[in-house]
Amino acid sequence: MKGAAGTLLPLAALGAVLIAAPFVLPHLGASLDLMQRVLDIGLIGLGFDLLFGVAGLLSFGQAAFFGTGGFVAAYLLVNNIIGSVWLALAIGTVFAGIFGLLVGWLAVRRIGIYFAMITLAFSQMAYFLEFSPLAAYTGGENGLPGVPVPYLGSIRISTGLPMYWLLAAIYFAGFVLARRILHSPFGLVLRAVRENTLRAAMVGHSVPAYKLAVFVIAALYAGLAGGMLGVFQSYMPPDAFGFDTSGDLIIQTIIGGVGTLIGPLVGATIWLYLRDNLQLVPGVGALWKLILGVIFVVLVFALRRGVVGELRYLLTRGRKAAEAALPEEASAAAEATAAPVPLPMTAPLVVARSQAPALEARGVSKHYGGLRAVDGISFAVRTGSIHAVIGPNGAGKTTLFKMLADEVLPSAGEVLLFGRRVTGLGSTRAALLGIGKSNQLNQLFLDMTVRENLRVAALARRRGAFRPDVLRAAASIAEVERQVAATMETLGLTARAELPVHVLPYGEKRRLEIGLALATGPNVLLLDEPLAGMSPAERAATRALIRDIGRSRTLLIVEHDMDAVFELAERITVLYEGRLLADGTPEQIQASDAVQNAYLGGLRAHEPA
């Protein structure tokens, strides 16, 4: 019941505000026309907030999709090509989505400012096309007047209050859908992409596919909002394609609160209300733009999370502080009592060659200009074994590991998983084939909870590289939840399940780093310095964890702790200056004069390592 109440309460509150607004806000100086414009901007803002606030992709091109949806629908209606307003709106929305697919396919290949600039370039091109080559269809500087209002059966939705109710209903439906997307497995992966793009790909998610999908979703929202603009104004204005449309949307979203969904609506209310009413203040005149800019700067500095974001932070701060204050002894006790739990999901075992080793490197090299970071290394890892790779700093261990997981493409050579070549497939495909990897430096989703971190990893094994399942709850897949629960119990992190990762102590973050790789259900697990930075007690616990994990899958470890290496490993590969120095059992490695001279500092077989 608590979960249901938490789901319905925001929707009930939004519904109450939308119903009360036309009766309350006119007494505060807000006209019905202003409220309709706010709802329309709020509608395009829902898609934009999924794109920017959830996935972390800043687009300056939403005006292009806004204008496309609006002008396609208006053209069809004004020229009597289609008599149904609803059908024209649907067609305009689809055209905006197709345009978004084209722009997104190009834009998601770039990151950061380059992504933003590509969207801006397409927006400017759309603006030029509307005013020049396509002026015969868009009306050019005159726009398209005479857009008809829709009918519900025999009821005409006239301008004024009936049109407000229509816009409110469409916005409410759009909000419900956006919220479902946010709390779906699809939405969880989008958050992971924003938090740590590389790690999202490493656990098996196709980052470009998710970026493109949310880009198209944002374009569809913008297209519908553009169509509704022409309908409620009975006129499609030429400035719909203008940069101001995209710029104002970004400003309003920041004011209201990025990543809150309702933020663009709140920001648009504040922005448009001040813009309309400042011009009515005697003596302000043309200074209203300056005053509005100053107000924006003040709001950004005073409310850095936005209006809604700050309210949400204040309401949840006490609860999160109480959760973070969970005694460390509770976590330690859970770790001490946790028995290893068999993980239910592993990658489908595809053996391409009979009797093939679990993992094999054949002459792999990585050259950076004249630097040979790894030079012609070959070795094999037996199925079901714990294999270690050691060597001094700069020996090429981490580079080798990245090539084994296909994060880095070798300059020469290949890597085989159970006889199947994985080199060139990419880290996402390698993860789905059954190679899991923890990193030397923690790569976690810091603002997400422990449970959500592990769920992101487990979802890839269950759903594949991409699935647009936007209508189901993120926690609704039983197999995934069993995997998450089993991984947390194995790691001793069950007591920390609902804590954001950034509040965890270092040792627990290190275990979670291993857990992200483990939750993907790998057949071969690569652990890059799993004991780095840990206290003696944490090292002992993690060594026991590694031993337990090694009972059910093949492990390959890079580690500087020689005591741990010789205790855990059944076979050891030694690197030196990027080349293979030795490969053998722990006893053979200890007895090797070459290893003793180059790495172990002259230790003899009878001396402790």
Image (tube, rainbow, N blue to C red):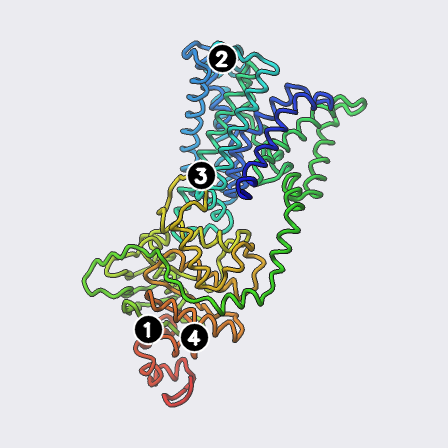
Alpha-carbon span between mark 2 and mark 4 = 76 Å
Q: Is residue 244 above or below residue 502?
A: above
Alpha-carbon span between mark 4 and mark 1 = 12 Å
Residue at the extreme right of the image, as rendered: 283
Mark drawn on residue 107: 3
**Residue in the foreground of this view, choosing between 199 and 538:** 538
Q: Are marks 4 and 1 in contact (CB under 8 Å)?
A: no
Mark 2 highlights which residue? 151
Q: Earlier in the sequence, mark 1 or mark 3?
A: 3
Residue 498 occupies which quadrant of the picture? bottom right
Q: Earlier in the sequence, mark 3 or mark 4?
A: 3
Amino acid on which disc 4 is placed: Pro
Q: Earlier in the sequence, mark 2 or mark 4?
A: 2
Residue at the extreme left of the image, as rendered: 354
Amino acid on which disc 2 is placed: Tyr
Q: Where in the figure is residue 447, as x and y percent of width and height?
A: 55, 52
| Helix, strand or loop under label 3 | helix
Alpha-carbon span between mark 3 and mark 4 = 42 Å
Q: Residues within 10 Å of mark 3 (few under 14, many from 20)?
A: many
Alpha-carbon span between mark 3 and mark 2 = 38 Å
**Residue in the foreground of this view, choosing between 290 and 421:** 421
Q: Which residue lies at the image location 46% right of the left edge and 36% below the top edge?
A: 215
Q: Are marks 1 and 2 in contact (CB under 8 Å)?
A: no
Amino acid on which disc 1 is placed: Leu
Residue at the extreme front of the image, as rendered: 1
Residue 15 occupies which quadrant of the picture? top right
Q: Are marks 2 and 4 in contact (CB under 8 Å)?
A: no
Q: Is residue 31 left or right of residue 552?
A: right
Mark drawn on residue 580: 1
Q: Is residue 567 left or right of residue 503?
A: left
Q: Residues within 10 Å of mark 1 (few under 14, many from 20)?
A: some
